Each structure stands twice: as C-alpha cells, then as structure tokens.
Amino acid sequence: MTKRILGVSPVESDIILKYLFEIYEKNADIQARVRWGPIKLGYGTTAIWDNRVSQHRTTWDHEGKSKNSRHATRVTSLAELPYFDPNSKSQREALGLPLDE
C-alpha cells in the first residue's frame, strides 16, 4: 500500500492519500466484479488487469458456494511506462455523469 507522496509535506500527503483511498473503497463505479464460471473442456474464466494502474482485491463471497476452485497466476506485461495525460477524461466525465456526486 502507498504510504507517502513524495514532493509534498507529510500532512498534505496523508490528506491526499486518505481522500484517494476513500474514493477507491466507496465508489462502485470504479470497480469491476468478475463472475467466475465453471471449467469446461479445461478452460474457465480468465481476468486480466494492469497492476500498474489498478489494484486487485478479492472478496470471499464465493466460499462454499461452488465446486470449482479458483486459481490465480500473477504475471507482468512488458509494456510502456505509465504516463499522465493532462487531456484525458475521468471515467465519470467519459460516461457523462455529474462530477460533484
């Protein structure tokens, strides 16, 4: 977990990180849920995401409800370095949703 933002005071860093962590934890519109399907012919559900710009957390709401086990393999892609595009839109802007909610 990120502990500090370099280039700002420790107090500013704490305030910004608290704000960002709360957004991440409370906003369902920036989360993705995967419905895992049964394995058929040796193939099941596959989920891929970029850990450079996202976070992964599992919920245990499936425990005891399925005969299918889950298996995860962490991989890292060889890709360009992430960059900031000042002209990009937030997800809410791209969807035409109000920004002040």
Image (cartoon, rainbow, N blue to C red):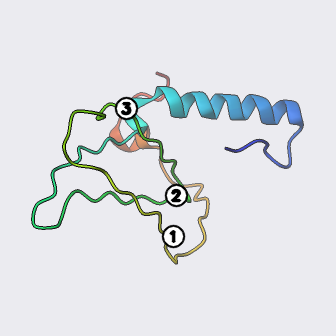
C-alpha distance separating marks 3 and 2: 26 Å
Q: Amino acid at mark 2?
A: Asn
Local crowd at mark 2 within 10 Å, few (<14), some, or many (≥20)?
Answer: few
x and y percentages locating residue 21 in the rendered image: 61, 33
Q: Nearer the viewer, residue 61 or 13?
A: 61
Residue 101 versus residue 32 in the image, above or below: above
Q: Secondary structure at mark 1?
A: loop
Front residue of this view, candidates 51 and 53: 51
- Residue type, label 3: Leu
Q: Is residue 37 left or right of residue 1?
A: left
Query: CA–CA distance between discs 2 and 1?
Result: 8 Å
Residue name at image x 10 percent, y 61 percent: 40
Secondary element at tag 3: loop
Q: Position of residue 22 (x, y in %)?
A: 58, 27
Which numbered disc flags the more N-terminal residue, 3 or 2?
2
For disc 1, the marked residue is 76
Closer to the camera: disc 1 or disc 3?
1
Whether pointer 1 and pointer 3 mark residues with C-beta atoms closer than 8 Å, the reply is no
Q: Quadrant of the N terminus?
A: top right
Judge the density around disc 3: few (<14), some (14-19), many (≥20) Cα neighbours within 10 Å.
few
At horizontal 42% and vertical 41% (from top left) the residue drawn is: 58
Q: Which residue is mark 2?
A: 51
Q: Amino acid at mark 1?
A: Thr
Query: Which residue position is annotated with label 3?
Result: 97
Q: Quadrant of residue 80?
A: bottom right
